[in-house]
Image (cartoon, rainbow, N blue to C red):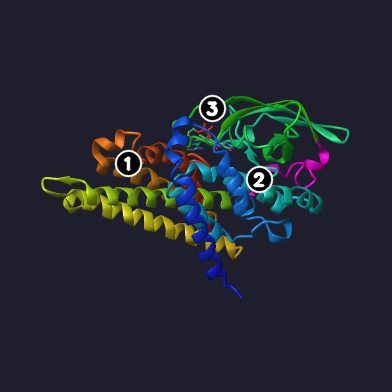
Amino acid sequence: MTSDRALEQQILATIDKWVDKELKPIAREYDQADAYPIDLVEQMKELGLFGATINEEYGGLGLSATTYAKVVSRICEVWMAPSGIFNSHLIMASCVQRAGTEEQKARFLPRFATGELRGGIGLTEPDAGSDLQAIRTVAKRDGDNYIINGTKTWISNGINGNCLAVLTKTDPTAEPRHRGMSLFLCEKGDGFSVGKKLKKLGYRAIDSAELIFDNFSVPADNLIGGSEGQGFQQVAGGLELGRINIAARGAGMAKGATDMALTYAMERKTFGKAIAEHQAIQLKLAEMSTRAAASALLVEQAANKYDRAERCDLEAGQAKFFASESAVQNSLDAMRIFGGYSYSPEYEIERFYRDAPLLCIGEGTNEIQRMIIAKQMVARAS
Ligand SMILES: Cc1cc2nc3c(=O)[nH]c(=O)nc-3n(C[C@H](O)[C@H](O)[C@H](O)COP(=O)(O)OP(=O)(O)OC[C@H]3O[C@@H](n4cnc5c(N)ncnc54)[C@H](O)[C@@H]3O)c2cc1C
């Protein structure tokens, strides 16, 4: 029988091979053209990535958070954007897996696992990001359906995906506000359209879109969990895994930037020796590798707790906060080590520098993250 550890090694070896053969050679071209990597998506389907954390009984790989986080990190060591194609999708899937009815699990999870249906989560609106309870998208009951009206923005996979978990207000007057919020699985159709594709500093190649719901009719059977007023908790319940996910991206990027800088510093010579032999560069490399290693350990700590079904909001928050800031700092330090060449799109490091800041924003900004960490510290000490 294959042990969990041996299985994890096999999976990571497969991912490493794929990253080397398929991702690395096209990253620069697709990032600069902001072109959607259709071939990669087909390969992701074959690798089972769209079902990575979906239970095996529904056709997924059923990976633990610990193994899944390592898969994400390995991809992000080279190119962060492709991980978003299945990360947001799996957050949608985890909402169904955790909070869906048995009928919803049977109807959606197998199609999510193959990638036949894929997408992400539609929470953010033009006037509501951190304060999600301020959303204005409304879902109104109409016989066996709900009619959705509103606008979502910054939605990953909004153009190339065909299904989204959409957060709405079913009772806009409810107090507290979260009691009036409900989450729907929306397959694209009449009344659900793309407003525009958003241009971005980084995280290119994956689509981010404004989405418009104009009298979009969704079956009442697609209300996750089957009863109104649970949407905010359903979304919040997925945040721990979402944060481990972002932390894993950060840990991968922090390591990738370090590896690139080390290789360059050993090759580039000034004043008769490799710049890696200058103490100022050594100090940077040492700090970078320490941040990368600490990020990976924080991710592992949070993921292990998640897999043991222990409360891990503090640990997931710490991992997300530290690993994302490390990705930003290591990308910047690597830029310094690359000198003038860091400014050229001929080298990969400028992409890391543009991609990394997103990690400080997504899944709860790092300002909010620190508030969550501190609140948990107080709660655990009380
Ligand atoms: C590339 C990209 C992809 C994204 N993908 C998705 C997606 O797939 N689905 C989705 O729903 N959303 C997505 N988002 C949106 C993202 O989740 C939001 O941008 C994020 O939640 C922050 O919201 P905001 O931009 O409205 O900032 P705001 O909430 O307006 O915050 C602005 C600033 O104020 C700070 N702030 C806010 N409230 C407080 C407070 N109480 N105390 C201290 N500081 C505070 C914030 O930390 C931030 O620094 C994406 C964003 C980007 C850029």
The residues colored magenta run 219-238
- CB of mark 2 near ligand 1 (< 8 Å): no
Height in image: 132 above or below 63? Answer: above
Height in image: 272 above or below 380? Answer: above
Q: Position of residue 143 (x, y in %)?
A: 88, 33
Question: Hey, which residue is sitting farthest right in the picture?
Answer: 143
Q: Position of residue 271 (x, y in %)?
A: 11, 45
> The disc labelled 2 sits on which kind of residue?
Met
> The disc labelled 1 sits on which kind of residue?
Leu
Q: Position of residue 316 (x, y in %)?
A: 51, 54
Label 1 element class: helix
- Mark 1 or 2, nearer chain start: 2
* Label annotation for residue 332: 1
Let me know if residue 381 appears in the view. no
Which residue: 84% across, 34% down?
Answer: 145
Label 2 element class: helix
